[in-house]
Image: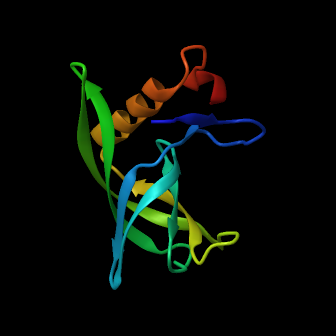
Amino acid sequence: MSVRVLQGAERRRHVRLEQLIPFKISSGDLDFVTETKNFSSSGALCLVNKHITPMTKLKLHFLLPLKRNNKVVNKRISCEGVVVRSESAVDQDSFQTAIFFSDISPRDSQIIHEFVESAMPPHESISKSL
């Protein structure tokens, strides 16, 4: 699994990891299974094959590969999100869709935070990017 920390000149509050995580999106007649392009404790960017209007509320389900006792266990996270951006992907018949996690339990939020922190290189610190 290749993980890359996305930082730089961005003004985001949370570090984003470039990592593929299985992701299910649903709302009314929408129902997509995809994977993230990048991921943070506040949201995700994924590719979907249909434009979703910004401010659309979504139900989200995803699996985080957590290390527990030298094994990888998939932790299912369910939350609600809001589309903040949907743009045509270059050279693809899909849309890059940015989703903000709008309603997530404090426990699941902490699990995501710990997952992101554990994937960072040892010399990096989340507190540096806040």
What residue sits 47% from the left and 75% below the top?
A: 56
Residue 54: percent from the left, percent from the top?
A: 56, 74
What residue sits 61% from the left and 39% below the top?
A: 13
- How many marks are shown on the rendered structure? 0
What residue sits 47% from the left and 65% below the top?
A: 82
What residue sits 64% from the left and 23% below the top?
A: 128
Front-most of residues 32 and 109: 32
Q: Is residue 122 left or right of residue 62?
A: right
Residue 4: percent from the left, percent from the top?
A: 58, 35
Q: Which residue is the extreme one toward the bottom?
A: 29
Q: Which residue is the extreme one toward the top?
A: 123
Q: Which residue is the extreme one toward the right?
A: 9
Q: Is residue 128 left or right of residue 57?
A: right
Assign the N terminus to one quadrant of the image: top left
The vertical placement of 123 against 53, above or below, is above
The vertical placement of 25 against 112, above or below, is below
The figure's colour scheme reads rainbow
Q: Quadrant of residue 23?
A: bottom left
Q: Quadrant of residue 45?
A: bottom right
Residue 28: percent from the left, percent from the top?
A: 33, 82
Assign the C terminus to one quadrant of the image: top right
Front-most of residues 35 and 116: 35
Residue 43: percent from the left, percent from the top?
A: 49, 51
The vertical placement of 16 against 81, above or below, is above
